[in-house]
Amino acid sequence: MFTVTINNKNRLDINLNGKIDSESMEIALDELINKSENITNGTMLYTIDNFQLPTLGAIAIEFSRLPSMFNLIKKFDRVAVITDKTWLQKASEFEGALIPGLEIKAFNLEEKEEAENWLKN
C-alpha cells in the first residue's frame, strides 16, 4: 500500500507498507504528482514499513515516468525517510547525495519526532 497525504501547503507525507504492483504504482505516482502540483521548496516525510520489493511491472511503470519524477523531485528541498531497514536508509541518503538541491536524511521507525524536527529546520 502506498498513500500520499498533504500535510501542509509545502509538505507531503508518504507511507509505503508492503508490496507494490503495477496498478498500485500507477495510482500512487498519479497521486504523488497531483498532490505535489503546487509545492515549492517542499519537504516530504516518507515512512517505509514492512518493505517488500515492488513487482517488475511496478518498476517498469516507475521507469516509464522518470521524466515527470525528475520534475517532481525539483519541488522538494528535504526528504526524511523513516524505516527500520538499514540498507534502505543508506540507499536513501546516497540518492540524496546524487540529486542536486535535494537533501535526504534517514531515521529509524522510532525516530519520527526527530525526523519531523529535521524537516522543520
Image: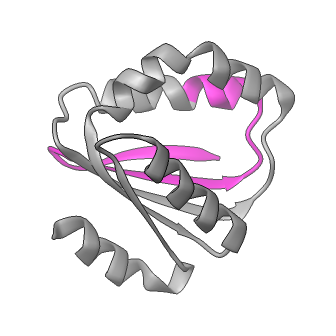
Kindly indicate the quadrant of the structure image that contains residue 111: bottom left
Identify the image quadrant of the C terminus: bottom left
Kindly indicate the quadrant of the structure image that contains residue 31: top left
Kindly indicate the quadrant of the structure image that contains residue 89: bottom right
User: How is colour applied across the structure in the image?
Assistant: one colour
The magenta stretch spans residue 120: no
Q: Residue at x 43, y 43 (%)?
A: 4
Point out the residue furthest to the right here: 56
Q: Position of residue 73 (x, y in %)?
A: 37, 34
Q: Position of residue 39 (x, y in %)?
A: 19, 35
The answer to whether 66 is drawn above or below residue 113 in the figure is above
The answer to whether 54 is drawn above or below residue 15 in the figure is above
Q: Is residue 85 visible?
A: no
Q: Is residue 102 visible?
A: yes
Q: Residue at x 27, y 73 (%)?
A: 118
| Observer-nearest of 25 and 64 | 64
Task: Decide if residue 62 is on the left or right side of residue 31.
Answer: right
Q: Position of residue 84 (x, y in %)?
A: 65, 76
The magenta stretch spans residue 5: yes
**Numbered circles on residues, count:** 0
Task: Decide if residue 51 is on the left or right side of residue 11.
Answer: right
Residue range in magenta is 1-27
Q: Residue at x 48, y 15 (%)?
A: 67
The answer to whether 45 is drawn above or below residue 25 in the figure is below
Q: Position of residue 66 (x, y in %)?
A: 54, 19
Task: Decide if residue 54 is on the left or right side of residue 89.
Answer: right
Task: Decide if residue 99 is on the left or right side of residue 25.
Answer: left
Point out the residue furthest to the bottom here: 110
